[in-house]
Image (cartoon, rainbow, N blue to C red):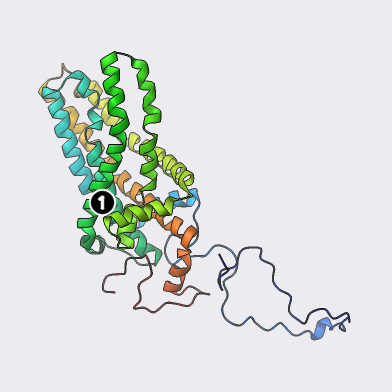
Amino acid sequence: MSETPGWTSPGSPEPAPGPSESGHQAPPVPQTTAAPAPPHPGPAVPPGPTPGPGIIPLRPLGFGELMDGAFALVRRYWKTAFGLSLVLACVLELVQAGVSWWLHTSGTRTEAMFDGYYTLPLEMLAGVISTGLLTPVIGNSLLGRDTTPSQAWAQARPHLGRLTGLALLQTAILLGSLAVPLVPIFALTGATMQPALLLLVPPAVLPAVFLWVKISFAAPALILERQSVVGALKRSWHLVRGSWWRMFGTMLVFGIAVGLLAAVLTVPGAIITLLIGGGPADIYATDGEAALGIGVMAVCGVLAKTLTIPLTGNMLGLLYVDQRIRREALDLELARAVGLPGHHPTPATAPVPGQYPPPGA
């Protein structure tokens, strides 16, 4: 990419002023009478990181900065982040509690072993929706604008129908990519009674992992770029091209960190449930013990999901912005929009390309 005025690479050599060499040595200029060099016309940005008006710097972000940024956004806009995630967490845990109670009253012990997986499709839906609803907070933060819960809802509400459609389609794609290879493997394992066939499961999930990374940016693209459902999926696919391994590694490590954080909040509930004998897999538990155990797990689950849902959404949103900075120089557009030194500000009436305009714009 050609160099842009006001955006120089660190370590770039400065051209020496004066005429070219002509074979004659110029007379030396006394140090005491040397006049200072005239200033370079126009403002200039010194080499180095470009600051931003918000808590996220306008430059490519490293993994540590992505982690810090995800937590910093939650701390800064905790009312918006936790207000949204609390609603989603309560819905998810109510459904999970209903499934656990059904398993206790009517399910088999084998079915109860997969208690935590029956709500997986619903959790996928909630993940896409939460990422889309939190994206305006990230977009406004990059421009130095705070976002209240009512403002975030007002900005995301016009896109809620398309966001729901995207969540349904994205969940169907991922579940389908899992079901197509796994169902035959499990069916063949049950028919032949050959547990060794389960060794095929890890390679069978690789297509789903590939698709998961490729379409992870669909929700931010739909909200910030006002894409259609299919257009958002195509946009995400294009943005990840050539950077799949970096995206996968970042999302995997962050997912492990978030999982450990969730475990800190849910493991105590699991221990209490085990002590009182109220787990869904405990066929000898009374209805009272089961209800108590399910209630304890639901409370711990709400706490864990309320904290982890916005963290995951912020990470995906920041990865989307980081990839656009790396591929499309979005940082220059944002810097011009907010009038950072060395960048000519854009007209106030023109929204930044790819960014959701502020309320009233």
Up the image or down, 61 lies above or below 202; here it is below
At 33% from the left edge and 37% from the top edge, which residue is drawn? Answer: 262
Residue for badge 1: 166
Q: Nearer the viewer, residue 59 or 226?
A: 226
Left/right placement of residue 54 relative to residue 7 reads left
Q: Quadrant of residue 113?
A: top left
Q: Quadrant of residue 147?
A: bottom left
Quarter of the image containing the C terminus?
bottom left
Q: Nearer the viewer, residue 200 or 355?
A: 200
Residue 326 x %, y %: 49, 58
Q: Amino acid at mark 1?
A: Leu
Q: Is residue 79 visible?
A: no
Mark 1 residue element: helix
Left/right placement of residue 290 relative to residue 356 reads left
Q: Nearer the viewer, residue 167 or 131?
A: 167
Residue 318 x %, y %: 40, 54
Q: Nearer the viewer, residue 113 or 215?
A: 215
Up the image or down, 157 lies above or below 187; here it is below
Label 1: how many Cα within 10 Å (few below 14, some 14–19, many 20+): many
Up the image or down, 253 lies above or below 72; here it is above
Residue 217 x %, y %: 36, 52
At 80% from the left edge and 86% from the top edge, which residue is drawn? Answer: 33
Residue 223 x %, y %: 30, 60
Q: Is residue 286 visible?
A: yes
At 39% from the left edge and 79% from the top edge, which residue is drawn? Answer: 347
User: How many numbered marks have been drawn onto this rendered protein structure?
Assistant: 1
Residue farthest toward the top in the current orientation of the protein = 193
